[in-house]
């Protein structure tokens, strides 16, 4: 999912990562492959946030999904894999 500025701020306060900027040269290719998302890079690799269905909470949440892992120790090359849910939930906003 593509996040607005408020959702992005809330996500980064709960998930230690960097956002891939809109002018990054790889963004167009990533969007062609994975769809329109806000992409995050962390110590594990490339991630996106997908809506999470959490009936037990009264908040809109998303789950971090891993798309690619770093393939080198210098964190400069990614190895894509099938999307894998990480179990990391992010609270985006309270439901009203």
Image (cartoon, grey):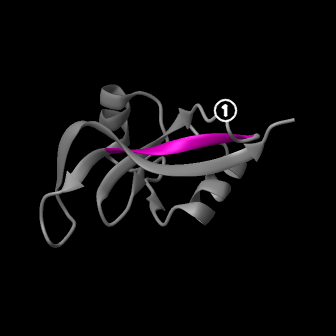
- Residue drawn 30% across and 34% down? 29
Q: Is 10 situated above or below 3?
A: below
Task: Assign the C terminus to one quadrant of the image.
Answer: top right
Q: Is residue 96 left or right of residue 46?
A: right
Total labels: the figure holds 1
Image position, residue 33 (x, y; %): 30, 28
Image position, residue 74 (x, y; %): 17, 72
Image position, residue 17 (x, y; %): 45, 63
Depth check, front residue: 83 or 1: 83
- Residue drawn 43% across and 48% down? 87
Q: Magenta span has 62?
A: yes
Q: Residue furthest right?
A: 96
Quadrant housing residue 61: top right
Depth check, front residue: 25 or 91: 91
- Residue drawn 76% across and 40% down? 58
Depth check, front residue: 3 or 60: 60
Q: Magenta span has 26?
A: no
The residue beneath circle 1 is 55
Image position, residue 42 (x, y; %): 37, 62
Q: Which residues lie in the magenta part?
A: 59-66
- Tell me the crowding category of disc 1: few under 14, some 14 to 19, or many 20 or more residues within 10 angstroms, Cα based: few
Q: Residue furthest left?
A: 72
């Amino acid at each position: 999912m593509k996040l607005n500025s408020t959702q992005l701020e809330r996500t980064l306060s709960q998930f230690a990562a960097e956002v891939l900027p809109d002018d990054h040269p790889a963004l167009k290719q990533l969007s062609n492959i994975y769809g329109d998302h806000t992409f995050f890079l962390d110590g594990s690799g490339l991630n996106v946030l997908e809506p999470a269905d959490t009936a037990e909470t009264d908040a809109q949440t998303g789950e971090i999904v891993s798309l690619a892992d770093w393939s080198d120790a210098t964190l400069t090359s990614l190895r894509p894999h099938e999307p894998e849910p990480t179990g990391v939930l992010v609270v985006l906003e309270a439901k009203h």
